[in-house]
Image: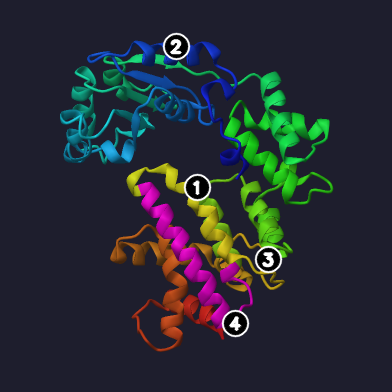
Amino acid sequence: MWSEKHRPKNVVDMVGNEESRAEIMEWFAKWKKGTKPILLVGPPGIGKTTIAYLTAKQFGYDMIGLNASDVRSKSRINEILSPVLGNVTVLGTPMIFVDEVDGIHGRGDYGGAEALIKILKEPTVPIVLAANSDSSDKMKSIKKVVKTISFKPIPPRLLRVYLQNILKKEGATLSPGSLIKVIDKSRGDIRSMINLTQSLVTGFNPQTEQSFESVNVEEGVNAFFKAKTSDEARSVLYSMQIDPRQKIDAFYSSIITSNLDPKSLAYFLDVLSKADVLYGKIMKTQNWRLLRYLNEILIELYKNDDRIRYTQYNLSWPLLNRIRWDGRKIKTLSSVMAKKLHLSSSSFATICFPYLLFCIKNKKIELELEETFGEIIDKEIELLK
């Protein structure tokens, strides 16, 4: 990715927030045992993590990087940081960097915030924290024991110079209009700006340059399976700037309703299951850094396959139409069955109902239903034949 390839190698190579960067350099230069830790606050993609790594390297520290998921429990903090705080000489010259610290609070916080604050009050090594925002009530306790340094979005004029320099190094060009669109959409997020530029330059519909402007879920899925190369397909994935759950669901509904042979279907569903497991892990741990691997899993879906086209719903149109016609009756049936299965009515209707029909059709299950419900079931089974 260009965002990694062109990551600054020194603090002076960074762009914007000159005063904030100077303040951080001064803090490192004057640091001594007991110096109050610093909290870097600002929107994603403007260089908070980058400057932490670069300053650690410049001042000769061995940086230990953590994020919110690593410091949610007291036991986990003690396991990771106790050796660092209590035996500095053995571990070289350590420095602690905790990224996304604003995500430490939540249902998975088992004493982690209190344990971290205790360490912040009596620091024996340099400690740098980073957060996208410090305005929540949950961050007040941390703000009291740190020095806050704010990062602002990069001005468009600086972003343009920075982006033009990267394009020059890559031997690529963008029209003035596209350059403005990229910078405007990134809203000061350098990482997003570079990724969007790479996607626009190297992949999706570069002749008209409309992919960046108008790509949506339907266009993205269809273009993905029409792509002539895996690199082009990868560019399409990065062009789909949508919620990761929505992205997985879009591929699932499109694949499950396509006319695929059993072997191909099994392969596609296996890949989607990996993506689903990754997303589940992200939601469970709130370790959003793992999100960078989602597209690398989804790229395994790539095949130049005309059989797959975008479908919003994961049920066939005949079945969906029947559900619409008998919606009230099915809703009542779903309500009854949902209570028995401890699900929501919508979950039963969209997930369980199709399988219930298959089971009844194949005589794997028998239900004692009222006459009205029995008629609905009979109609649905007819559609499956």
To which quarter of the image does residue 177 belong? top right
Assign a secondary structure to mark 3.
loop
Report, in whole angstroms, how far the alpha carbon at label 1 lies from the one at label 4.
Answer: 31 Å
Q: Which residue corresponds to the image point at 56% horizontal and 20% vertical from the top-left?
A: 12
Q: In this view, which residue lies farthest toward the bottom?
A: 363
* Amino acid bearing label 1: Arg
Which label belongs to residue 23? 2
Q: What residue is at 35 percent from the left and 33 percent from the top?
A: 103
Dot 2 alpha-carbon crowd within 10 angstroms: few under 14, some 14 to 19, many 20 or more: few
Mark 1 and mark 2: Cα distance apart in space: 30 Å
Q: Earlier in the sequence, mark 1 or mark 3?
A: 1
Visible residue check, residue 111: no
**Residue at 46% across, 86% down:** 361
Q: Viewed as shown, does residue 151 lie left or right of 85?
A: right
Instruction: Measure the C-alpha gap from mark 3 to mark 2.
Output: 53 Å
For badge 4, the amino acid type reads Asp
- Give the Cα distance between marks 1 and 3: 25 Å
Instruction: Say which label, 2 or 4, has the lower sequence index.
Output: 2
The disc placed on residue 292 is 1
In the rendering, at what x and y percent does residue 17 appear? 55, 16
Residue 309 shows which numbered tag?
3
Q: Residues within 10 Å of mark 3 (few under 14, many from 20)?
A: many
State which quarter of the image contains the C terminus.
Answer: bottom right
Check disc 1: other Cα within 10 Å, few if <14, some if 14-19, many if 20+. Answer: few
Counting residues from the start of the chain, the first of labels 3 and 2 encountered is 2
Residue type of the residue flagged with mark 3: Arg
Highlighted range, magenta: 255-283
Query: Do the residues under discs 1 and 2 have CB atoms within 8 angstroms?
Result: no
The image position of residue 115, as x and y in percent, is 19, 29
> How far, Cα to Cα, is label 4 from label 3?
15 Å
